[in-house]
Image (cartoon, coloured by chain):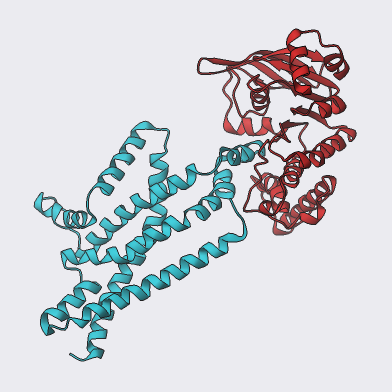
Chain colours: A red, B cyan
């Protein structure tokens, strides 16, 4: 059984069918890169996986546990628990501007750990310290230890995105998703973010990356999906998809992406 | 009437002005948020009702509202009577809650969807997202328009005079009608100016305190 199983995900907005039945599986430790032109449904697929959109049909299973089955009613609480299997890094970073970098990372774990639990002051303190220690480690991973006390507005876009990655990692998701993580960045800032993602690959993280960076995709991916018009047009290893694409649509997309 | 006596009468009036100002502000700031939630509610009848109330309150003069709340129940033979001051307070609180609620709504709607989504994917509950993520950003954005309203409130308190509540303007008029001392109008202008200066300064401090980050 595969680590992540996505089957028959469909999603329409009004009369527009954005996803027309998406199936794929991936294994633990793999990096899946999703490419495709704007409007092909890549972002919607990622948002469905993260429960930001509710698919009209289909199911999502992680590690044998069924997380989503269309038609079943999920309470807010259930959705909250299930979506924690996934982490999400947004195109626009979406850091919380009023908090320091460190607080951005510790806020969610603290809220989670302290909720519904009767903790003594000392236990809270110990837990806080542990969460903070972990956050500092993550900041080190993304190379921003010295920015712990800064506010997001004091950072460059690339630095903000690296903080967003650390923030997503703090909740220890099974699968980390990136929605065009470099699309909102100036070209000279994309490198630092892509380097961090490559670094995470070497530490065996399971990741799904939606991107327009073709060279990066080819370098980092174990599997590549090319999406067009709401379906998976091509699926395979980077060499298969980039090297010898089967479909004409993929060929056309790849040759236009080169320019 | 000596200057000291005038100042004493005016101070009595000013204390009523301050009380109307303080109580209205303390009650409208939270009540406005209730109106905001009403006007943004997914329950349609509640949303329509709130929008209707806001329309009526913003669409009629505050002076008229004060008069209606004070005289209305009696004229309709209702078994309900407010003291003058209470009638003023009720009118002011409802009126300012409606104005505040629209400022809050504008503030809430200006927060990017991504902030809510970031909270969601981090497993936060709706109240956590509202109180820990969104609220402070809203507060920062609405300080300038709220400042406008609050300064208007300082001067609107003079409308209480219409049902003979002795606030600052009424106190001045009482003196002027007895002693024909027009200078008293200048004195109360100074009262208002001093008070709005203080409010402006406090608002400036609030803005400065929130300037450590940008949204």
The front one of B47 and B74 is: B47
* Residue B68 percent location from the top left of the image: 17, 53
The front one of B97 and B126 is: B97
The front one of A194 and B33 is: A194
| Residue lying at 68% horizontally and 51% vertically, measured from the top left | A152
| Residue lying at 43% horizontally and 45% vertically, measured from the top left | B105
Is B122 located above or below residue B136 in the figure? above
| Residue lying at 81% horizontally and 46% vertically, measured from the top left | A138
| Residue lying at 60% horizontally and 42% vertically, measured from the top left | B115
- Picture quadrant where residue B81 is located: bottom left
* Residue B213 percent location from the top left of the image: 62, 56
Relative to A143, A76 lies left or right = left
Relative to A231, A194 lies left or right = right
- Residue that protrudes farthest toward the front in the picture: A259
- Picture quadrant where residue A70 is located: top right
Q: Quadrant of the N terminus of chain B?
A: bottom left
The front one of B183 and B132 is: B183
- Picture quadrant where residue B147 is located: bottom left
* Residue B138 percent location from the top left of the image: 51, 50
Q: Can residue A47 be seen here?
A: yes
Q: Can residue A63 be seen here?
A: no
């Amino acid at each position: 059984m595969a680590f992540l199983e996505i089957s028959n995900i469909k999603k329409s907005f009004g009369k527009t069918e954005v996803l027309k039945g998406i199936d794929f599986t991936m294994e633990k430790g793999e990096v899946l890169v999703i490419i495709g032109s704007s409007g092909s449904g890549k972002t919607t697929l990622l948002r469905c996986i993260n429960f930001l959109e509710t698919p009209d049909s289909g199911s999502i299973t992680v590690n044998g546990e069924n997380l989503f089955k269309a038609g079943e009613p999920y309470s807010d609480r259930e959705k909250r628990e299930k979506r924690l299997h996934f982490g999400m890094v947004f195109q626009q970073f979406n850091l919380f501007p009023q908090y320091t970098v460190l607080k951005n990372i510790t806020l969610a774990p603290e809220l989670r750990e302290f909720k519904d639990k009767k903790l003594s002051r000392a236990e809270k303190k110990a837990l806080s310290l542990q969460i903070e220690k972990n956050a500092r480690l993550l900041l080190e991973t993304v190379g921003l230890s010295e920015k712990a006390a800064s506010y997001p507005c004091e950072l460059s876009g690339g630095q903000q995105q690296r903080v967003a990655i650390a923030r997503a990692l703090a909740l220890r998701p099974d699968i980390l998703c990136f929605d065009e993580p470099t699309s909102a960045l100036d070209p000279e800032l994309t490198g630092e973010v892509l380097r961090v993602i490559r670094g995470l690959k070497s530490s065996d993280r399971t990741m799904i990356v939606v991107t327009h960076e073709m060279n990066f995709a080819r370098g980092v991916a174990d599997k590549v999906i090319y999406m067009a018009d709401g379906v998976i047009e091509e699926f395979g290893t980077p060499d298969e998809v980039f090297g010898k694409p089967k479909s004409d649509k993929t060929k056309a997309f790849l040759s236009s992406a080169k320019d | 009437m000596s200057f000291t006596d005038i100042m004493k009468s005016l101070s009595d009036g000013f204390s009523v002005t301050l009380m109307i100002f303080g109580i209205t502000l303390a009650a409208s700031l939270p009540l406005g948020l209730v109106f905001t939630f009403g006007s943004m509610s997914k329950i349609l009848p509640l949303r329509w009702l709130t929008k209707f109330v806001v329309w009526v309150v913003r669409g009629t003069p505050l002076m008229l509202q004060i008069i209606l709340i004070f005289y209305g129940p009696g004229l309709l033979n209702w078994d309900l009577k407010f003291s003058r001051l209470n009638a003023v307070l009720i009118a002011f609180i409802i009126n300012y809650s409606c104005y505040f609620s629209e400022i809050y709504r504008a503030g809430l709607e200006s927060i990017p969807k991504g902030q809510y989504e970031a909270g969601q994917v981090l497993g936060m509950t709706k109240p956590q997202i509202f109180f820990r993520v969104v609220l402070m950003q809203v507060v920062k954005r609405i300080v300038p328009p709220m400042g406008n309203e609050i300064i208007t409130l300082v001067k609107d308190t003079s409308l209480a005079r219409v049902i003979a509540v002795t606030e600052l303007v009424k106190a001045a008029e009482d003196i002027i009608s007895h002693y024909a001392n027009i200078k008293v109008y200048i004195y109360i202008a100074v009262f208002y100016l001093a008070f709005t200066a203080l409010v402006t300064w406090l608002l400036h401090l609030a803005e400065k305190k929130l300037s450590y980050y940008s949204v």
